[in-house]
Image (cartoon, rainbow, N blue to C red):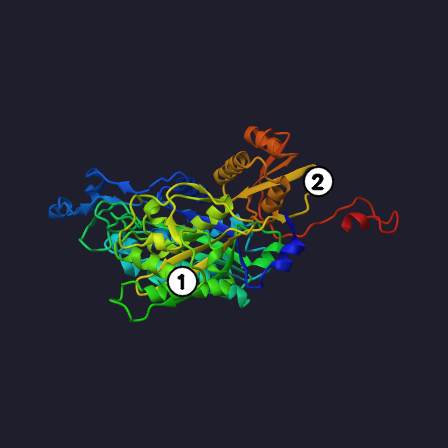
Amino acid sequence: MISTYKILEKASDLDIAIVGMAGRFPGAKNINDFWHNLQNGIESISFFSEQDLVSLNIEDTVFNDPNYVKAAPVLEDIEFFDARFFGFSPREAEVIDPQHRFFMECAWEALENAGYDPEKYEGLIGVYAGTSTNTYFFNNIYNNSNLNNISNTYALNKDFLTTNISYKLNLTGPSVGIQTYCSTSLVAVHLACKSLLDEECDMALAGGVAISVPQKSGYLYQEDGILSPDGHCRAFDAKAQGTIFGSGLGIVVLKRFKDAVNDGDCIHAVIKGSAINNDGSLKVSYTAPSVDGQAEVIVEALANAGVKADDISYIETHGTGTPTGDPVEIAALTKAFRTFTQKNGFCAIASVKPNIGHLDTAAGIASLIKTVLALKHKQIPPSLNFETPNPQIDFANSPFYVNTKLTDWKTNRTPRRAGVSSLGFGGTNAHIILEEAPEIKHCEESRPWQLLLLSAKTGSALESATANLVTYLKQHPDTNLANVAYTLQVGRRAFNYRRILVCQNVEDAITTLETLEEKRVLTAYQEHREQPIIFMFSGQGSQYVNMGRQLYE
């Protein structure tokens, strides 16, 4: 491990730290589930029976068409929302797009994951994000409500995603909605980094969300179209015939790297540089990809990061599994890397889309979070459904090879570095260069006893918070209990239902929280009162000068 002083001495002023993450993906309710699925090569595509699709009232001619594919990557529990927690009435919650609901919940989770309560944080927090089309409105609201009676009509507009987060969480930094289709969420990360470097904010939430309603719905396959004929995405494979769109979302919390080190934050990875551009009109069509445009954005990102292509050992590609898109992407990557090196076969590539589908506006953030997790765990997950290379891709004479199994991410005494690409319909390309977080040596001195404090808005939520803490401590038995105690007290909002425990170590905390021993655990309902502390003494108080001064101080 390296001392904080040496870390700061070597760090660039342009480095951005990822200090928090949250996400919900097909087959994964949180980041841990997501990593488990990636490690184990799980394909989270749902295939539906006829009974599953009855409620859609699809015409028989469509439903029985051999080209109708009964598959989709599904996000669980989109019908649920803790409206009361965020101060929404039940009526308001009914009309809010699930994309906004889920993004709001994940924004809160991401800040908690970073260890910050925005009410206590003294800096400015910005929000940069984008969302997909509000299909919930067309399928659930339009035919079932009198729109004139909906007072909160702004909730129907997808462009209020970021400003609503800023309002509900009291965030006073820039609040900017982004829309570049498939590359939206990675463009949001790039712009958030720029905002931090320009000191427009001190912390930033960045990401994207895409939830299509109804989720359990198939699609019609069209030959030479973008969609897969069988519901499977086969990035870079000879059998690749298209992708499959699904639902998901992700958010990262960003800070200037030097600030994150000084503040003792948990740093998941470091953004060394990023770039965005557009293809312009020198291509076949509006939606067609461009070798030159993609290559240029990669070269610019590497230059901004001060990193050579030889230093990159993994690329998380856009990788849609389309016969045209995949060869163009590898051609562009090769062209960019050839600016720096003539070496072949040294850089692994993969795509998350065969695992969870194409998440539209959330595709880029899914790729970024996957790569951050790979850096943290020092493993490269497999790219699924790859057997034989697409004959239009000359991997042998390129710097790249498709990683098809869970692989230890080895390094030759240099930090692990990766690139992440996201390419949008209409030509807006984004590329980000990541580096693994340094192992920072912090002071290990701590008191022998720790105070753990939990709070929630309801009694049931307090029980859930207790169970979640027990689960976390069991999964991370080597965790620093002093850090846990600090985060629970400083990085969490204080609510009325509270529970405290004094304990010596992780094992003691687990045992006591599971048994809720009355002599060790205090649970109470704390009424919120804005009142000062009053010291009361019997008698005159003039027995001797400064009688209560020590207690007062």
Q: Which residue is mark 1?
A: 336
Q: Are the two marked residues, 2 and 1, in contact with CB atoms closer than 8 angstroms?
A: no
State whether residue 14 appears in this view: yes
Q: In this rendered view, identify the residue nearer to me: 526 or 282.
A: 282
Mark in front: 2 vs 1: 1
**Cα separation between marks 2 and 1:** 53 Å
Residue 382 picture quarter = top left
Where residue 490 sits: x, y (%)?
61, 49
The residue that appears at 29% across and 61% down in the rendered structure is 148
Query: Which amino acid type is shown beneath numbered disc 1?
Result: Ala
> Number of numbered discs present?
2
Q: Quadrant of residue 32?
A: top left
Q: Is residue 19 left or right of residue 131?
A: right
Question: Residue 36's spot in the image, x, y percent?
Answer: 43, 39
The amino acid beneath tag 2 is Arg
* Left or right relative to 135: residue 188: right
Q: Position of residue 454 (x, y in %)?
A: 57, 41
Q: Is residue 474 left or right of residue 327?
A: right
The one nearer the camera, 369 or 157, is 369
Above/below status of 499 relative to 512: below
| Residue displayed at 47% across by 62% down | 302
Q: Which residue is mark 2?
A: 447
Looking at the image, residue 394 sits to the left or right of residue 18; the answer is: left
Say few, some or many: other residues with alpha carbon within 10 Å of mark 2 (under 14 / 14 to 19 / 20 or more). few
- SS of the residue at dot 2? loop
Please tell me whether mark 1 sits on a helix, a strand or a loop.
helix
The single residue placed furthest to the bottom in the displayed view is 281
| Upstream in sequence: badge 2 or badge 1 | 1
Establish if 438 lies above or below 36: below
User: Could you classify mark 1 by the number of other residues whose Cα lies within 10 Å: few (under 14), some (14-19), or many (20 or more)?
Assistant: many
Residue 187: name its quadrant.
bottom left
